[in-house]
Image: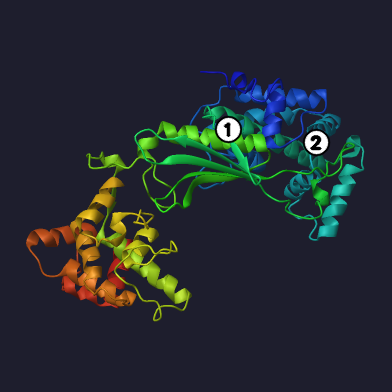
Amino acid sequence: MDSRIRQVGGRLGDMAPEEVVCAFAGEPAPGNDLARRLVGETLAALDQAPRGTLMIADLAYGAKDWPELPVTLPATPWEAVTLVDALAALVRSLTAGQLREAAAGLGLRRGELLTALLDALPDGPTSAMQELGLLAALADSAPQTWTTDQQQAVRKAVLVRLAALGDAFVRVTEHQPAPLPWLAQHGILTGCHRVAASPNILEAVLRREPDRSDVRDALDGVIWGEAGARGREHWRWKVGWRLPDGRFASHEGAVEATRAAAVFAAEQTVAELLRRAPAVRQRFTGRLLVPRGRRPQSAAEVEVVTLRALLLAVFNEDRDLHRQAATEGHLWPSLPHTGPDHQIVSTTAALFEHLGLPYPCVGEEANTAEPGTEAFDAFLQEHAVVLTPPARAYLAGLGAAGPGHRQLRERHASGLSAAVRPGTPEEDQLLVADLGPLPEGMVWSDLLDPPALERFLDEQLQER
C-alpha cells in the first residue's frame, strides 16, 4: 500500500509532514519536541490506514467517546475505532508533566480542555462562572498536584487533538487533487474543469467567511504558553455545476480552517467527481453530471419513480402548504415547470423536487412540455429517470385537470383518477407492484377518497 506520509511531502513547499497536516487542520505547528514526536507518531500510526473507508472526523468522533465506542449515524467504521485505540496508546503512559508539555506544544485551547474536563466530571459545574473556575484551577496548578480526573481530562484533550490531526492527514492523502486554474475576483476564487462527454463544467468556488464574532472568545486562547487567542480563518468551498438557466447548483461543500485546505478539498472533490463522472447525480437536483442521451442505461444508473413515491410526495407538499397557510390560496398551472424567476411552477416539478429528482428549467424544451410527451420523455431519459406505468399515468393526469391554475387537490384527483381507473388484469398487477395489494373489499377507485388513500399508505408503510 502506498505511504500516505510520502504523499504529504512537498504539499506545501518544504514543510515537514507534521507541519503540513497542522496547517491543513488550521492548528499551530508542534511547538516542542514532545508535541512533534506525538504528531509524527500519529502520522506513522495512520500511514497505512485503509483508503475509501474513513469519513471526515471519524477519528475525532471516536476519540471524544474513547474508551467507549462512538455512537454516530452512519456508524463509525471499526477501522476508525481500531486506529483511535492506536492513538490512545501514544498518550496512555504520559505523566502529568508530559501531558502539560504536550498540551503546550500542541497549542491546546482553553475550550478544548474545558470540554474534556466537563466530560470527566458529569456532575461538575452548572454555570459558566463555575466552568471557568474549573478551568482556572487546572491552568494555574502544578501538574504534580493534578487529580486523577484532571489528568484524564488533559489526556483526553491531547488525544482528541491528535485524532483531529489524524483526520486531516487521512483526508489530505485520500485522493489526489485535480489542480484547477484559480481566478480571483472580488475576494472569490473560482476554478473550472471540463467533464469528458458532457456539456457540464465542474466549478469550484471559494470565499473567506467573515469572523464569526467581533470579540474572540476567551476559550479560543491557548491554555499554556505565551500565545493569546488565535485568529482562526474560515474558508467556505463548494463544487458543483450550472443548470441550463445559468444557476450554479452546489453538489458538495464545507468550511475549512485555511485557504490551502479549502483549495485542496475543492480540487480533491473535483478529482473524485471526474473519476466517477458517469454515475454522479447532483446532490440537490438529481441531474446527471454526464447526461445519457438516448443510449441504454445500466440498472445501477436508473432512478425508478413509482406511483407510491409520487403520492407520498403529494402529501408532503400538502403539509408544506398547510404550514405556510397557503393550501387554498396556492394555485398550480400545468406548465411551465419552472418560471423565469427560477421558482417551481408546476405540480410535476414540485413533486420531483420532493423526491430529489431532476425537473426541467428555463431554457430546456421540456420546461413547456407535459409529462408523457416526447420532449419530457427525452428529458427523463437524459437523466436516467424511469416512470412506472402507474406513475406515468398519474403525471399525465395532472395536466388533464386543465391548463389554467388549479388547487393541488384538483390536480391530484385528476392524476389519481387516470392512474387507478378500471383496467385490464395486467394494469391491476402494475398497481399492486407500485402500491401493494388492496385490503379485502376495496377497489382501486376507493383511493380517490383522500382519507382512504392516507390510511392505505400508512398501513402499507407499517407492513414494510
Give x and y (percent) for residue 184. 62, 40
Question: In this figure, what is the number of numbered marks?
Answer: 2
User: Residue sitting at 36 percent across and 38 percent down?
Assistant: 198
Residue drawn at point x = 80 percent, y = 34 percent:
103
User: SS at mark 1?
Assistant: helix
**According to the image, label 1 marks what residue?**
171
Image location (x, y in percent) of residue 111: 78, 47
Instruction: Check the image and name the residue furthest to the bottom.
Output: 328
CB-based contact (under 8 Å), mark 1 and mark 2 = no
Q: Amino acid at mark 1?
A: Arg
Residue placed under numbered mark 2 in the picture: 107
Whether residue 20 appears in this view of the structure is yes
**Residue 170, picture quadrant:** top right
The residue closer to the viewer here, 412 or 36, is 412
Q: Disc 1 or 2, which lies upstream in sequence?
A: 2
Residue 19 position by quadrant: top right
- Is 427 or 93 nearer to us in this picture? 427
Q: CA distance from mark 1 to mark 2?
A: 22 Å
Residue 5: quadrant of the picture: top right
- Pinpoint residue 194: horizontal percent, then vertical percent: 43, 35
Q: Amino acid at mark 2?
A: Gly
Q: Is residue 91 left or right of residue 190?
A: right
Q: Residue at x 75, y 45 (%)?
A: 116
Circle 2 SS class: loop
Q: Is residue 304 above or below residue 172?
A: below
